[in-house]
Image: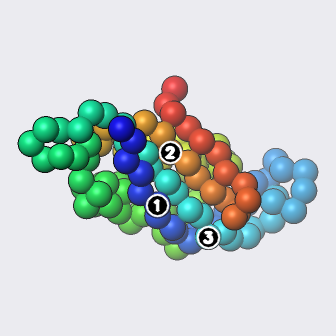
Amino acid sequence: MIVARLFEFQAAHHLPRHPGKCRNLHGHTYRVEVLCEGPIDPESGMVVDFADVKAEVQSRVLDTLDHTLLNDIIDYPTAEHIAAWIWERLAASDLPLAEVKLWETPSCYVSYRGA
């Protein structure tokens, strides 16, 4: 069973090695989908509580990234690097993490399932 929850945060970044417009400072409304996977616990009837997912993502990811300059936190913050950073932060939790999806725009996203 897969349980997923969506989140949003606002942040700016720039990619100095990028050949196009992304080399300049700009911002995004990022959307993050956190997917957890596991069996349904017979006692709780859940894989993971949505509230637990929210608490972990809020404290480990959103409190750090929201309304920041991502270059100050993540080395060369491409969508790929941001998703891997989020994965690493959440992998240290007790969540049964399966996948992290990060949308940089409404039509462009990356998906990460760990190294």
Q: Which one is nearer the viewer's eye here, 63 or 49?
A: 49
Give the residue at the far right of this rendering: 19
Q: Amino acid at mark 3?
A: Thr
- Residue 3 placement, left or right of 45: right
Q: Is residue 98 above or below residue 49?
A: above
Query: Which comes before the other along the chain, label 3 or label 1?
Result: 1
Q: Amino acid at mark 2?
A: Val
Determine the residue positioned at 65% across, 45% down: 110
Q: Is residue 114 above or below residue 94?
A: above
State the residue position of label 2: 100
Of the numbered discs in the image, which one, if any, rests on residue 6? 1
Q: Which one is nearer the viewer's eye here, 97 or 16?
A: 97
Residue 62 image offset from top left, x and y in percent: 42, 63
State the residue position of label 3: 29
| Mark 3 surroundings within 10 Å by alpha-carbon count, few (fewer than 14), some (14 through 19), many (20 or more) | some
Mark 1 → mark 2, Cα distance in angstroms: 10 Å
Query: Which comes before the other along the chain, label 3 or label 2?
Result: 3
Determine the residue positioned at 90% across, 51% down: 19
